[in-house]
Image (cartoon, rainbow, N blue to C red):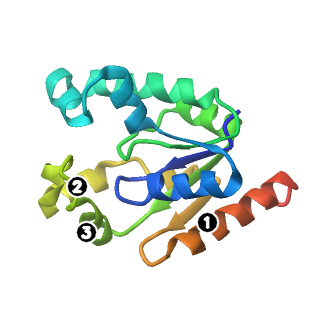
Amino acid sequence: MYDFGMVGFMGTGKSSVGRRLAERLGMDFYDTDIEMEKITGMDLMTLYWKYGKIRFQSEENLVLVKLLRRENCVIATGGTLQLSEERLEFMRQSGMLVCLQATPEMIRRRVVRRANRPLLRQAHLLEELYASQVCWELVADLVIDTTEKNFEEILRTISSAWEREKHGIL
């Protein structure tokens, strides 16, 4: 179905890399956060604070399942997407799962500029959330640390792995 699923913690580059990868390969690009905002008619912070974590995760899951049925596309998931056996199996059957990582220090530098993540400006909150996340890197087809890499290096790594996978070399 889809070709690439970008997973990892917020601020690791899923949307930026995913958008560039889709453009390079002539694919469609979808960001689950943007799709959630379109469907619910509210920004993610409002959705979370008004309706809570369970509703937020339910909306996120519905959007993800819908997007995973699309073809010829790159999907960037939300940075706090929870790992479940069912979700993982569906994602792995549908395409290549790419996990992007970065150090907490780099993530803080990247997200502090964003107005929609005010709580993460406090270093201890970011590190607590970072530490509490399930490690997508343990189940992904490809893991890339984006801390010190530029977009071109990341895109070459993904493209190369994709070519190997298509030819059964991975």
Residue located beneath label 1 in the image? 155
Does 101 appear above or below 73?
below
Query: How far apart in space, not on screen, are marks 3 and 2 (Cα)?
Result: 10 Å
Question: Contact (CB < 8 A) between labels 1 and 2?
Answer: no
| Residue type pointed to by label 1 | Leu
Q: Earlier in the sequence, mark 3 or mark 1?
A: 3
Does 49 appear above or below 143?
above
Name the image quarter holding residue 165: bottom right
- Front of the two marks 3 and 2: 2
Q: Earlier in the sequence, mark 3 or mark 2?
A: 3
Residue located beneath label 2 in the image? 114
Q: Circle 2 sits in a helix, a strand or a loop, which is it?
A: loop
Task: Look at the image and tell me in which quarter the C terminus lies.
Answer: bottom right
- Could you say where residue 109 lies in the image, as x and y percent from the top left? 25, 69
Residue located beneath label 3 in the image? 109
Query: How far apart in space, not on screen, are marks 1 and 2 (Cα)?
Result: 24 Å
Report the number of numbered marks. 3
Q: Earlier in the sequence, mark 1 or mark 2?
A: 2
Q: Does residue 76 appear to the left or right of 120 in the view shown?
A: right
Residue visible at 46% across and 42% down in the picture: 77
Query: How far apart in space, not on screen, are marks 3 and 1 (Cα)?
Result: 22 Å
| Residue type pointed to by label 2 | Arg
Q: Check the image and name the residue furthest to the bottom.
A: 148
| Residue type pointed to by label 3 | Arg
Name the image quarter holding residue 147: bottom left
- Could you say where residue 30 lies in the image, as x and y percent from the top left? 52, 39
Residue visible at 69% across and 33% down in the picture: 71
